[in-house]
Image: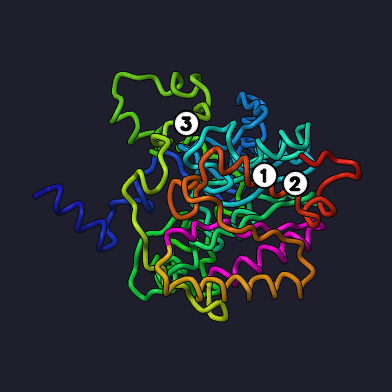
Amino acid sequence: MQSNQKAENGRDGGNTAEVPFGSNDIRLSGLEWIVAGIICVAFFLPAPGLWAQFENFGPGPDYRLPYALGSDYWLYSRYCRWACSRYDTVVVGDSVVWGHYVSADNTLPHYLNQYAGRDQFTNLGVDGTHPAALGGLLKYYGRSISGRNVILHLNPLWMSSQKHDLRTDKEFRFNHPKLVPQFVPNIPCYKEPYSKRISIAVQREASFFNWTSHLKIAYFENMDLPAWTLEHPYENPLGAVAAGLPAPANDNIEKAASWKERGMGVQDFQWVDLETSLQWKLFRQAIKLLKERNNTVFVLVGPFNEHMFKEENIAAYREMKGKIETWLRQNNVAYYMPESLPSELYHDASHPSAQGYALWARQLFADESFRSTLLPAGAPNP
């Protein structure tokens, strides 16, 4: 009763002193909050740069971003800076450039270097980067790609259906959602709440948040530290960091077999109208961005596995290719649009085998547009 009476006295203006807001032992004044903010910013801003000095990152010939780190955009940005300081030409694209079914020394950039007789080309492909994501990758994390030669690959797979073109109204999970436009243009199947979209937009511009994301992906199995320690209660987090970056393993490579040997049959590709294609629109924006950065752009289209087509799909595909070619010519973009490779040199609809990459590179070196755009005078012609 006595304690209740004291409480009443406090509320009614009695003798009990009013307790200040909160229960914190330490309270900061306005000036102290400003000082604390300055201290935090002083730590946050240099942390990513200091970490880059500490972290052992030494790409060599035929390096490609490890498959497990495909969404580590901070590391991709760092790799871009390294590659652009050493190579004349960067090769950018999705898993076809990356080399999904082949080892790092059997990709297109590898064979281009082999035919060039020197290390001129480097692999900046990332698995799953459809054009809508590729534009974001280049805009926010490929800023170092400036004043370079760029081979930009267009995989027709991304325009083979309304779903691949991201124009279905029904929500579905696609690759690299953090790279696609968050607000404009609207992507019908992308249903993230606006709070999440704003967070993604902020992270793109904040090196500190990209760096913390890198730590989670590269060292802690894409988990934050509390979650990781729950999963690994007897392991030291510093030990995970000390182990270093994951090696560029080939653990995703399936047994080398052609698409027919894998049991894949012909498919019904529902090619979209190029005039309304979202992926094609964003691919053109990627070309524009690269040109604005004073790059020389050379576009590769395909080669798609036309052996998988149903008869009724062929005409629509060739009409689409014709429109792509017309646009590239009208906009003075050098390009190469090869014929389909032999059937046995495909693992699926768009990924060549090692022999397919070697043949593709050889065809490129024989193409006059490729030679005049990207190769020095007197370059070998295998």
Q: Nearer the viewer, residue 109 or 240?
A: 109
Q: Earlier in the sequence, mark 1 or mark 3?
A: 3
Choose mark 1 or mark 3, whichever is in front: 1
Query: Is label 3 in a helix, a strand or a loop?
Result: loop
Q: Which mark is residue 250?
A: 3
Q: What span is in magenta?
A: 279-308
Choose mark 3 or mark 2, whichever is in front: 2
Residue 189 location (% of width, % of height):
39, 70
Q: Please, what is the three-letter code of the amino acid marked with disc 2?
A: Phe
**Residue at the spot x=53%, y=75% of the render?**
277
Q: Is residue 296 magenta?
A: yes
Q: Please, what is the three-letter code of the amino acid marked with disc 3?
A: Asn
Name the residue that disc number 2 marks. Answer: 365
Marks 2 & 1, CB-CB < 8 Å contact: yes
Q: CA distance from mark 1 to mark 3?
A: 22 Å
**Residue at the spot x=60%, y=26% of the render?**
55
Image quadrant assignment for residue 195: bottom left
Name the residue that disc number 1 marks. Answer: 361
